Image (cartoon, helix red, strand yellow):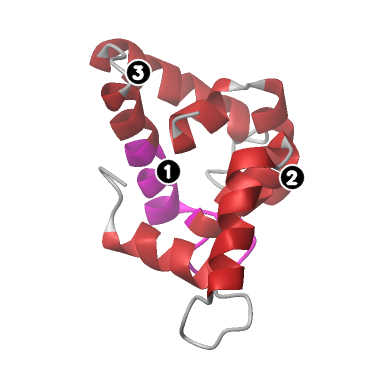
Amino acid sequence: MKGTTPEQMKGLFDFMDTDKSGTVSFQELSTALGLLSSGSNEEKLEFLFGSFDADGSGTLTGEEITALTNQMKSIGASLGRDAAKMDSFVQGLLAKLDKDGDGEITKQEWITAGLATPSVITLLIGQ
């Protein structure tokens, strides 16, 4: 995916490699693609959270949040969105995602805000 960092790709790979074999089987790949194409918004948000949670801590922090915002901006640009408006939108979205303002985004904060803001999924997978 355009604008995806090596760390994000590793996170996505690790998340799809559900049996932790070091390879992604056809079944693991088809499950992930099926989820992204026809899963519920909550399932998509859970999957995407896992792909950005590089250290598997259950919380997005620092570099993980930067990777998230860069992905949103990149997909927004590929969809023809104005860069200045995207910056403003992403900053507002981060404030909404980090409900308690602690600089971290928990999985629950992610899902709650994501379900209330449909454009989150659009800006992460381009749908």
Disc number placed over residue 108 in the picture, else none: 2
Tag 3: residue type? Met
Residue 106 in view in this figure:
no
Whether residue 13 is visible here, answered yes or no, is yes
Q: Is residue 55 magenta?
A: yes
* Residue 78, quarter of picture: top left
> Residue 93's x, y, as percent?
52, 24
- Among the two numbered marks 3 and 1 on one chain, the one whose residue lies closer to the N terminus: 1
Query: What numbered label is drawn on residue 68?
Result: 1
In this picture, which residue range is highlighted in magenta?
52-71
Is 99 on the left or on the right of 5, as rendered? right
* Residue 29 among those drawn in magenta: no
Compared to 32, does 98 lie above or below? above
Residue at 59%, 41% in the rendered image: 37
The reply to whether dot 3 and dot 1 touch (C-beta < 8 Å) is: no
As drawn, 78 above or below 3: above
The number of discs equals 3
Q: Residue at x 50, y 28 (%)?
A: 127
- Between residue 37 and residue 96, name the one nearer to us: 37
* Closest to the observer, 115 or 122: 122
Please provide percent x and percent y for residue 70.
32, 39
Left or right: residue 105 versus residue 7 is: right
Q: Which residue is labeled 3 in the image? A: 86
Circle nearer the N terminus (2, 3)? 3
Give, as a three-letter code, the residue at label 2: Gln
Q: Are marks 2 and 3 in contact (CB under 8 Å)?
A: no
Badge 1 element: helix
